[in-house]
Image (cartoon, rainbow, N blue to C red):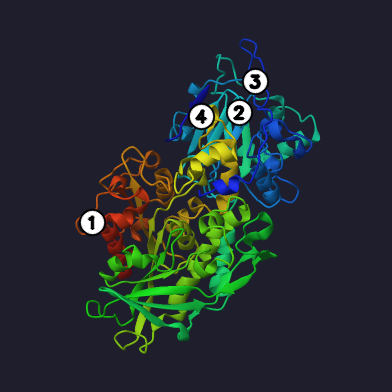
Amino acid sequence: MRCLAWTTSSAVMAALLALHGCSSSSDGAPPPTQSPQAAVEPMFEIPSSLDLLAEEHWFDHPWPSDMRVDDNGTIHLLGYYNPRAAALIKTYLKQMNGRMQGFSPVASGFLRFNGPIDPSTLPADPIKARAAEASVQLIDVDPASPDKGTRAFISLYWRAETGVYYLPNTLAFMPTLGYPLRPSTRYAVVVTDQVKAADGALVRASSNLRQVLGLDAPQGAPQQALRDRWAGDVQTLASVGLAAEHIVHLSVFTTASPTAETVAVAKDARTVQPAPTVNPADWKLTTQATDYDVYEGTYGPSPDYQAGKPPFTKPEDGGNFGFEGGVPIKQREFFPRFALAIPKGAACAMPAAGYPVVMYAHGTGGSYRSFLNDGTARSLAKLCLASMGVDQILHGPRLPEGTTTPPELLFFNFENVDAARTNPRQSAIDEVVRARLARESGIEVPASVASGGAALKIDGSKVIFYGHSQGGLNGPLFLAVDDGARGGVLSGSGSMISITLLEKTKPDPNVAQMVKTVMLRLYTQEFEELNYFHPAISLAQTLIDVSDPVHYVPMILRNPLPGAAPKSIYQTEGVNPDGTGDSYTPPHAIEVQAVATGLPLMEPVIRPIAEMSWSQSTPVTIPAGGLTGNLASGLASGVLAQWRASEAADGHFVIFDIPAAQNQAAGFCRNLADDPVGKVPAP
């Protein structure tokens, strides 16, 4: 049977996936026959070599587990269960094996048993899983962690029968969506004897597990080694009420630090590389609109850290950040073109320090002038804010000449996992450099170019970010690793590739459908096994973690980098009461990101968010005078604002199609320019 103990109800990839053939193989061995009232035991193999844990035997030991670390300190990926021999999965495993330190702080894990258990004896929801008596718990056991001994939110999925990618009697678990684990921290997932077998019999620890727990003498070197490795963790579990004799399944694993490389590269771009400047010879006045004038030019140098051959189409082209001895290495530099919309002086006299500026990052398929065409520049100029657009990575001049693959297939590159992992991160670095241009070098339209004959300045101390879609994916990374902006607006911005792969339906072809049929080679009758816990989806999440906003957004408000200030965030979601709406960024992905950020839901609520209830976050009503200081102990402001998707061309575009949404976003930017704490205006 299948039971959700708790759960809630990217990219155009078809052309890439179609390049890879698949062939079928065994779905896995059937569950062993159980005699009446025979005790169920965990699958807990401790092999002499990790190579023995491969294919149908991959989950004979828990995943993740610190036992699955090679001598060089990286997690062992070769042999990950690939029952349909999918070539794309083979490529991922080969490309990434030996390169990843630590396990995903958000992806699902798997504990198997040799017989069925009773799912009614599992915790019914994440809150119950934090109780001391819960039958399954996820606990911080790291001696260096400030949260040592704390129980984390955990979600569970039990599946007794064999699937294509699921082996029989699998208990899948994951940190509850929106609540990522701490980076670089050791955790234990524990099953206690409060879990019962499906027939009412006992569930008991296997011989191998008893040896590791210290209940029996080790019978071999592998058992002794794992016992020694986990001894301190077993003691920590005992100190929080989980005695070894009551543990019937266990795994201890250390999480990765998905943001570490991006933080290091951002620091290099900000402090080591030369500051960018505007090329004085390139200034030109290109547009005179009712509310603003548009000036264009170029600036640079802007460093590019992606090693290899742009646009990194194939695995052999590279695309990862270049490091030597732990130090980021600039690979090349470029000079972005930009458009700068400055309010008309007659309506908005320039402040002494210059105009505040909103840095706009467009969506896939856009350009440096997108903010002029979608109404954003106008809405901001009416409030006396300047705005600036640039070409996002792999757009305009940033797409190498002769490239025939469209930007959406290159940015969300599912053929080359290095590019997929690093394109969003390089995009964030681009924003670090752009903010540095405004803050450090300065932006000033010369009098000889300005429409009024007087120089026009930008106030580099008042920078706000505004990202839509692809720009909304890069934005959280930028806001997390750099303090150059006070905060920002995020439109069509979501987290968790696990959700995206299952629920993204636009642009055509339908990604969710392609994942089922092309990537995983599932037949219609097999679709039912797909969910957020799925083993193949878990692998994808693990590989993409370094660029997934879910790991960065906690750094924006809750845990800023040392010396950085919390930043105010206005995030939008286009959704209908039934959960549909945004076809490009699934509503659930937007909601999970808001939870991880720490944003409350703004009234009126169109669709309640289950994950917010676990932290007792309640919707907020915006007073007539606005909502200020509701986050970060009064140092920041923000909400997730839901707008009815049916009132827009698609829920993805509510911030452009619904005037109230666009006006609220613009007002948020104006307030943030006036006060670093910010204020969410009433809708």
Give the alpha-carbon distance from disc 2 to disc 1, as whole Å: 52 Å
Pointer 3: what residue?
31
Mark 4 or mark 3, earlier in chain: 3
Label 2 or label 4, whichever lies nearer to me, is 4
Give the alpha-carbon distance from disc 4 to disc 3, as whole Å: 20 Å
Residue 634 visible in image: yes
Mark 2 or mark 1, earlier in chain: 2
Q: Disc 4 residue type?
A: Glu
Q: Position of residue 182 (x, y in %)?
A: 53, 49
Number of marks in the rendered image? 4
Q: Are the two marked residues, 4 and 3, in contact with CB atoms closer than 8 angstroms? A: no
Report the side of 130 relative to 264 (left or right).
Answer: left
Give the alpha-carbon distance from disc 2 to disc 3, as whole Å: 23 Å
| Mark 4: secondary structure | helix
Q: Nearer the viewer, residue 498 or 479?
A: 498
Q: Are the two marked residues, 2 and 1, in contact with CB atoms closer than 8 angstroms? A: no
Does 33 appear above or below 151?
A: above
Pointer 4: what residue?
528
Does 273 appear above or below 145?
A: below
Q: Disc 3 residue type?
A: Pro
Picture residue at 65% right of the left edge, 55% below the top: 314
